[in-house]
Amino acid sequence: MKKPYSSSSFLILGLCMVSCADAFIGINWGRLSSQRLIPSMVVDLLLQNGITDVRIFQQVSNVLEAFYNSGINATFGLSNSVLDNYLNPSTVQWWIDNKIIKYDNIMKFRYVTIGNNPFSPMFSDKMYFNSIPALKNLQKGLNANGKRDIKATIPHYTDVLTVTATSKPSEVDFRPDIKEAMVDYVRFLGEEEAPFMLAIFPIDYINSNGLDIDFGFMDNKSKHKIKDINATYTNVFELLYDSLHWALNKAGAGKVKILIGGIGWPTDSYPGASVENAQRFYKSFLPFIASGVGTPMRPNESIEVFLNTLSDENQMPLKMGLYHRHWGIYKFNGEPKYKIDFSGKGGGEYPSIAKGVIHMPNRWCVFNKKFDDPTLVQSMKDMACNVSDCSSLDGGGSCSKLSYEDKISYAFNGYFQTKGQASQTTNEKCDLGGLGVVVSEDPSDGTCEFPVEILSAEYAIEGATFGSVDSGGERSVHAGGWASALVLLILLIRILLQFKQQEYSLTTT
C-alpha cells in the first residue's frame, strides 16, 4: 500500500528534478476579463516565477508574439464551436501553417488542445463527438509537417467518468453514453504517445458529493477514506487520478499518460472558496507533484500539471458557477493573493508581482443613498451587475455580508471601473440614473475589496476596433506594436490630466 504523502517525500525531490525532466508545473492563462494585463507583462510574470509552461486560451498575434525567445512552452488549441471546420484537411493545414509553423521560430509548443470538455454536461448541453475526428486530423497533420513532437489531446472534465462519492477507483469506467467514442479516442492517444488531459476541481467534487472539505487537500487531515484493493485514498486528487487510470486500463490504453489540464482552488463565491483554503491546497499539492512519488496505481510517476489559473476572469460565463470567476492565484492587477511556491519545493513566500502595471486614479463610484424610487435603484444595480461582476455579493462571497446600500455601491463601482472610469468633469459613467457619486475614499470593507481599474493598452480607447471572437472564445484586438505604444502614451497623458484635475478640485474645495 502506498504510504501517505508527507514532508519526508522532499528527500527524493532532488532526484526527481533530474529523472523527471519531462514533468512540469505550468499554469493556465485565461483572458475573459474586463481588466487585462498586456501579454508582455504576463510573459515577464511567468519568467519571474520560473514557470516553464503555459496553457493559453487565445491565439491572436499579440499574445503569441509576446513569447518571443522566452523559452516558455505554450499549449493552445481549438474551441468546440469551430471543430466541424477541422474535419477538412485543407483547414487543418491552414491552421498548422498560421498558428504553428508561422511562430515556430519565436516560441515553443508543447500540446495542441482540440475542443474543451466536449462530453461534459457541466459545461455544455451538447456533446461534441466531432472532437475526436478533428483531433485525429490535427495530429496527422502535425506529423506530416514534421511536428510529431507536438501532441494533440482533448481537454476533459472528471464527469466523463462514472465516479461517485463512494466509488472505488477500480470500479470506475467511462460513462456508458460516450464509452465507445472514448475507447476509440484513448487507443489513438496510445498509438501517438499523446496524453489524456483531465481537469480536476477538488472543491467541486467535495461540494457536489457532500464530503468533508478536508478530503480536498493533500495534508492527510480528512476523516473520509476510500479503501480499494491494497490502497487507501485520503484526498480527491489521488482518487480521481487513479479512477482515470482504471478507465484507461479497461479501454485497453492503460499506459496512456495522464496530463492534468487544470487544477486549483477558487477564492470566492462558493462554499469553502477562500484565500486561506487556496493557499492550503497548494501548500501540500505542489510538493506532492514535485516529489514524483506518484499515486497508488501509478507510483513513482511524474505528473504534468497546469494550475488553474493565473488571474481572475470577471467575464467568465456564469453558467459554470460564480466561483469560476475566482480561480486566480493573482488578482486581475497582477498582485498575488496568497503565498505559493511554483517550484514545489515548499517555500512560503508570496510570488513575484506583475511589473509595469498602472492603475486608474483612486476613484470609486458609490450609491448616493437616494431611495426615492426603489424600483429604479434595483434596476440600476441589476444593470451594473450585468455589465460588470457581482459574484462576490452572492451567498458565501467575500462581499455577501455587506448591507443592501453597500451592495448597490459595489455594483455601481464595478460598472464604473469596467467602463474605464469617467472623465473628471462629466462623471457620466457614474451617473446611473442620478444615483451614483464619485468618491476618493476607498469604500472597501474588510475582506470585500472595491477594485480600481488598471490601464491596459488593449482596452484603452473607447470605440476601438476589436476582432471577431477567436477560437478560444475571446475578443481579439488588431493592433501592432507601434499602435500599442501610442495607446499607452495616450493613457499616460490621460491619467496625468486626471490626477491634475483631482489635485485642482481638492485645492478649490
Image: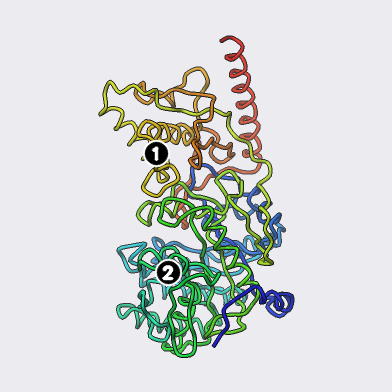
- The label number, if any, that marks residue 157 in the structure image: 2
How far apart marks 1 and 2 lie (CA) works out to 29 Å
Q: Quadrant of residue 369?
A: top left
Q: Nearer the viewer, residue 433 or 178?
A: 433
Percent coordinates x, y for residue 30 in the rendering: 52, 54
Give the residue at x 50% y 39%.
446
37 versus 187 height, above or below = above
Q: How many marks?
A: 2
Question: Tag 1, which secondary structure?
Answer: helix
For this view, does 198 lie left or right of residue 386?
right
Q: Which residue is mark 1?
A: 387
Q: Which residue lies most toward the top here?
A: 508
> Is residue 112 at least partly visible in the picture?
yes
Q: Residues within 10 Å of mark 1 (few under 14, many from 20)?
A: some
As drawn, the label of residue 325 is none
Q: Nearer the viewer, residue 93 or 114?
A: 114
Say which quadrant the N terminus sits in.
bottom right
Q: Residue at x 46, y 55 (%)?
A: 273
The earlier-in-sequence mark between 1 and 2 is: 2
Dot 2 lies on which element? Answer: strand
At label 2, the amino acid type is Tyr
